[in-house]
Image (cartoon, helix red, strand yellow):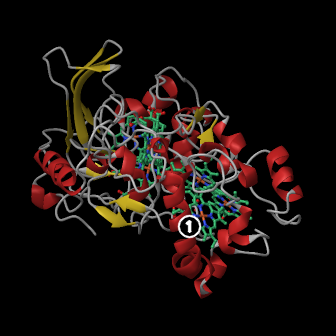
Amino acid sequence: MAISSDRVRLLRRWAPRNDNKRKPRNDNPYRCIWVFAVFIIGILFLTPYSLYSDSGKERPHGDKTKLLKGCASCHKGHGIYNTPMLSERKELYCFRCHGQSMYVEKAKSEGDLARDVTTANIQKEFEKPYHHPIEKIGIHQYGEILPEVDSSMSPHAACGDCHHHHLVKNDNKMSGIRGTNKEGLRVRITAEYELCFNCHSFSANLPADQTNKAEIFKISNPSFHPVIAPGRNTYVPSLIPSLTPSSLIQCTDCHNNDDAAGPRGPHGSQNRYILSKNFTTTDGSVGDSEYPYELCYSCHRSSSILANESFQFHYSHISREGASCRTCHNPHGSTQYTHLIDFNRATVMPSDSMQLLYTDFGNKKGQCSLKCHGKNHDPAVYPSGISNPSPVEPSFMPKRFPSRR
Ligand code: HEC
Ligand code: HEC
Ligand code: HEC
Ligand code: HEC
Ligand code: HEC
Ligand code: HEC
Ligand code: HEC
């Protein structure tokens, strides 16, 4: 808490804000002239260097075999009002070439885009029920400072938050975008999560039902999915090769297009939380069907989980009682317990003796004190029959101390 409020103050000092900050910028009559001047300077000195230099070949927006008119494929005459001479409102702009075929055909017939180029239809992704809210238009500003420090700002996400209009690359679609590292500092992006942390970590306007992902993936936590660094557990028998306990995964391994043949990216999905595969967070899916937890089973063998290779009571809870993985595990990390244990308080209550606790006794051994669907564990120990267990000593916990990095 202290850290983030320090940060906020620091940012405020760097970037003094006033109430005009987010006012539409078109109330300045000279803006048009300024934009034109900057544009000419850009053409003469700056942009050609970055867009069309030798490395420009890997920048698709600098490829004149595809964008036949170069800069003019995107910038027209004086352009429309309040844009840097763009031919379309900014929010719709990218769909000219990455949207429905109707738009793309138009760009082709106007000679802006080569006939033989096929671009992915990203517009379709944003029409799915769960998507990043690009329809919240006009909030994003080029050069804005994220994470947001003003709690009254409406959260937003635009194409330009995740892709740079000039510097985007085929092999690095975040190229040119600044990110937020695990400490909350502004950095050049070197890992995908640093893009996501711009809006899903220390933002003052984080929605109430979302957690700070930098805190939950923090590598000093007792457990976390290996997004920032390899995980702490060395015994994860369920992993599907070539995954191992030293693998790293990305946010977009779970948050992605549900259509595996469609364009990649966390744009939109038919699944809630923009998940690439189905995941049921609530209890009630009795039986051996993989479907409710197919997201988890894309990396963890269901045959291992349901054969109780680690937790002796996986099968009885999942298949017989219909408990969701989410009832016991957090898909991101746990600030309290090992093994991503973070009980879902929607169903898990304190036990009759008012205990709500998980204790790790070492590999495949532990105990829970809780009450769930009326069933009282006060406590319940696994594996069944172990007697007189004692909690793991720090020295017996190589998976906690020190962290494997
Ligand atoms: C793929 C389309 C596209 C191409 C090609 C393109 N631009 Fe842009 N340009 C944009 C967009 C979109 C913006 C507005 C970014 C914003 O404000 O969020 C922009 C903004 C600008 C700006 C304002 C400063 C900035 O970077 O925001 C300048 C100057 C500029 N472009 C110059 C050029 C020049 C010169 C070329 C050719 C070398 C070029 N652009 C090619 C899409 C393009
Ligand atoms: C005038 C046409 C045009 C416009 C407008 C345009 N793009 Fe592109 N874009 C292309 C072409 C052509 C490619 C290269 C083909 C491809 O890889 O899909 C490309 C490639 C990309 C890529 C990399 C795709 C990949 O598969 O590697 C991204 C990301 C991208 N554009 C985002 C944007 C965004 C965001 C905007 C709006 C600011 C935008 N584009 C506007 C034509 C355009
Ligand atoms: C520029 C800001 C921004 C960036 C960058 C960003 N997001 Fe988001 N994201 C949002 C906003 C705004 C929402 C909608 C929040 C809401 O539910 O009100 C959202 C929603 C989501 C949701 C759905 C949440 C829910 O409750 O359904 C997921 C999942 C998500 N983002 C993942 C990601 C991932 C993964 C990345 C990085 C690849 C990322 N986001 C990058 C702004 C951003
Ligand atoms: C192993 C899969 C997995 C990975 C990796 C993952 N998520 Fe999630 N995420 C989920 C699932 C499942 C849910 C829905 C259930 C829940 O919220 O507990 C979710 C929910 C969310 C939500 C909405 C609810 C909330 O908790 O805030 C956001 C935002 C989000 N994830 C962002 C991210 C970001 C950012 C990253 C990377 C730093 C990431 N996720 C990595 C599986 C994953
Ligand atoms: C919240 C961040 C975010 C937003 C908003 C966003 N993208 Fe993406 N986009 C990504 C990520 C991450 C990838 C995938 C990168 C990867 O897998 O290498 C991606 C991939 C792409 C690709 C390549 C897809 C493929 O498989 O060929 C295109 C094109 C693209 N985005 C265009 C857009 C356009 C246009 C918009 C706005 C309408 C947009 N994106 C909005 C994060 C975002
Ligand atoms: C009733 C609580 C509970 C439920 C429900 C549950 N788990 Fe677990 N799980 C545990 C406990 C406790 C451990 C730790 C076992 C140990 O001590 O090593 C564990 C360990 C794991 C592990 C790490 C070791 C391994 O097996 O590779 C994975 C992966 C896992 N669970 C996945 C899942 C998935 C996927 C689901 C849903 C299909 C699920 N769990 C449902 C309690 C649960
Ligand atoms: C993209 C691949 C991927 C997906 C999807 C995935 N996991 Fe994992 N998971 C891993 C990897 C890799 C590890 C090993 C980390 C380690 O060694 O601590 C792991 C470890 C775990 C552990 C053990 C962590 C510990 O510290 O003991 C649990 C529990 C777990 N996953 C549960 C889940 C659940 C529940 C889901 C579905 C919501 C899920 N996983 C989805 C890749 C994945």
| Label 1 CB-ligand 1 distance < 8 A | yes
Assign the N terminus to one quadrant of the image. top left
Instruction: State the residue at coordinates (47%, 29%).
Output: 281
How many discs appear? 1
Q: Is residue 308 left or right of residue 51?
A: left
Residue 167: image location, x then y, percent: 55, 69
Work out whether 9 lies above or below 59: above
Q: How far from the left and from the top, in percent, is residue 140?
A: 46, 45
Determine whether, in the image, residue 66 is placed left or right of residue 276.
Answer: right
Residue 263 is situated, as x and y percent measured from the top left of the image, at 69, 53
Q: Residue at x 65, y 54 (%)?
A: 86
From the image, tell me which residue sits under label 1: 39
Which quarter of the figure has residue 276? Answer: top right
Classify the position of ligand 1 by quadrant: top left, top right, bottom left or bottom right.
Answer: bottom right
Tell me the quarter of the image containing the C terminus: bottom left
Mark 1 lies on a secondary structure that is helix
Q: Is residue 66 left or right of residue 240?
A: right
Query: 10 Å neighbourhood of mark 1: few (<14), some, or many (≥20)?
Result: some
**Residue 299, visible in the rendered structure:** no
Q: Does residue 321 show up?
A: yes
- Across and down, in percent, residue 29 comes to 49, 47
Near-viewer residue (388 or 69): 69
What residue lies at 66% left-to-right and 34% top-to-bottom?
A: 128
Taking 141 as reference, is 14 above or below it?
Answer: below
| Front-most of residues 319 and 48 | 48
Q: Which residue of the protein is positioned furthest toward the front in this rendering?
A: 29
User: In the image, what residue type sits under mark 1?
Assistant: Phe
